[in-house]
Image: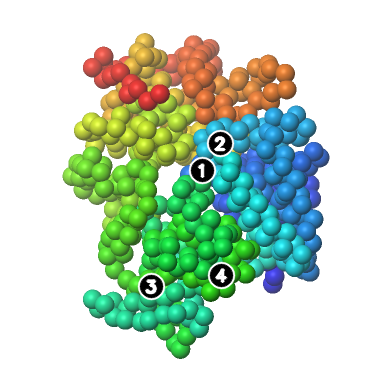
Amino acid sequence: MTIYDKIKEQIQADFFKQNFPNDGQRFVAWYLRNIHMRDMNETRDDITDGADDKQIDAIVIDNDKSIIYIIQGKFISGGIVDAEPLREVLASWMQLRDLERLQVVGNTRLQRKLSEVAQALDDDYEICFELITTSKLTDAAKNDLETFQIELAKISENEDWNATITLVDESELTRRYELALETDNPSINYTLDLSDCKYMTETIAGTQVVIAAVPLKDCISFPGIKDGSLFQKNVRQSLGTSNAVNKGIRQTILGDKHKDFFFFHNGITAICNKMEINGTKMRMHGFSVVNGCQSLNTILSCSEPVKKLEDTYVMFRFYEIPQRERADRISINTNSQSAVKPRDLRSNDKRVLNLKRSFELKYPTGYFITKRGELAPANKDKNFQIDLSDFGKYLIAWHSQRPNISYGETKIFDKYFEILFKRDYKPDNAQALNTWMKEVLKIWSDKNPLSLNRTLLAMKAYAPYHHLYAISMCFSISNNMADRVPSPHVCIEKAKQHGLVEEIVKISGLSLNMALEAAANEVQPQNRVFSPQNWIKAKTCLAGINFAIRNYFQMLPMMPGGQQVSQKLKEGLVLGQEDFEYRWAAD
């Protein structure tokens, strides 16, 4: 069965047929669900296809990777496609450079997403155009793609506008889908043909090693570059094409000194669990690149010109490393040749290590995950597991009262790290935040027990932190301490004591929902469209949440059975003045 046949069969599901009017939209929606891993609400929100879509079928804002994906899809059975889809991508690119005009002429869904795009561009997000098709490009179209990639590279060099274009054709779509099926425990197996490489094999310190000069054009065939799965054991993912090191790599590739690339580059380090060499075929099991993420992403962004390069190599070091701890050390020690953002190395900060130590001493069955990609041991209690990245987001939402900053790691682990992690944080407070958030996420499920607005559910990547903030404000407002922050541990213990955990989570979730709906109903300035995503990322949304909480408390006694619940809340939400502190300033 071809990938077209698989998709054709899968888009007959009720979700696709009930929400999207034609197979073209259903194909794009399938791609968002299966490749970008968007949930049903996010998928509906991301689709912009339709009348006046201006050649933009979908827009995905990836806050974790700081990338804006502009997607154009062509669902065609077999055969090849000409350059027309590429021209549509080019048209969307030209129009995106004038966002103000595009918002005026685009459809309502596009206008709303463009408001979010504008905010992301202000935060220096990179743009990635993805042309997805179930067919292959003609030779002429491939030439156009090469030209487009070169032009985008030139513009990125000369202007503050970083963009790349990726072709996801039949073969790449198949590969991504197969990899997505293993996303919970991805393991890449790959066979490299060494016949075009210049290589040597050695055994060093009992480890099988292959040192090879690999043609640059062979690198773009490595699986898992764009989606990051090849770099699971790396200390960081792609930093985009806008930093100085990656710009230099790209200039060498596209310039007349490309044959010197081998000498200009420090080389790439790859590891695998098992390595088998049979003639010139090297089979690697559990293949992962631990140093070279930036280089390979930059090489891929120039894929079409790279395919034509001859006598252009990059040095690879392939190691057979089955020991996980040893692999981690290699990853850390080989990532010091270029500037690393502070958030990439916070896992080794003494304050983080101290927090990890105190948490695991307090909760012996618990585990504090500090490294990206790290997994807790199987014998640890999942209810007492915290990830450093998530924990930073909890802190800024609760203690700094700025959930609008929780959506991305950059500000938390760069600008506000000293504020959030400077103090000896009590492990019982850390576990309390962890417990509150687990209760919150039960609400943000497909079952949607609170019947939250579908638009709010589409913001699952960051709106739950506003829900966590609302929980803290339930206690603060009830105690007339709206300018102070309650202790997370005292809050959860008091709520458990009075059997109010679920009720407080419910009230805070409904208040968030009411705040969004109230903001959506406000009159907008001329030629402006209300953007839920921009509202949730703005500090002004906090006043709306607080107002909704106060209003709910006032209206509760008048609801059926509300008098009893109101009295119970009065008792269960009462805290002492010593249980509050001033918020940690983070703005």
Q: Name the residue under label 4.
A: 217
Does the CB distance between marks 4 and 3 fall below 8 Å? no
Residue 473 in percent (x, y) is at 41, 20
Residue 57 in percent (x, y) is at 72, 46
Q: What residue type is labelled 1?
A: Ser
Which is more N-terminal, label 4 or label 2?
Answer: 2
How far apart marks 2 and 3 lie (CA) works out to 37 Å
How far apart marks 1 and 4 lie (CA) works out to 27 Å
Q: Which amino acid does label 4 sit on?
A: Lys
- Name above or below for residue 545 compared with residue 210: above
Q: Name the residue under label 1.
A: 66
Which of these two is toward me, 419 or 577?
419
Give the SS element for disc 3: strand
Tell me: 1 left or right of 323. Answer: right
- Residue drawn at point x = 39 percent, y = 63 percent: 266
Q: Nearer the viewer, mark 2 or mark 4?
A: 4
Give the SS element for disc 2: helix
How far apart marks 2 and 4 lie (CA) works out to 32 Å
Residue 424 in percent (x, y) is at 21, 33
Say whether residue 497 is visible. no
Q: Mark 3 points at which residue?
A: 318
Say whether residue 230 is visible. yes
Which is more N-terminal, label 2 or label 1?
Answer: 1
How far apart marks 1 and 2 lie (CA) works out to 8 Å
How far apart marks 4 and 3 lie (CA) works out to 18 Å
Q: Name the residue under label 2.
A: 120
Which is more N-terminal, label 3 or label 2?
Answer: 2
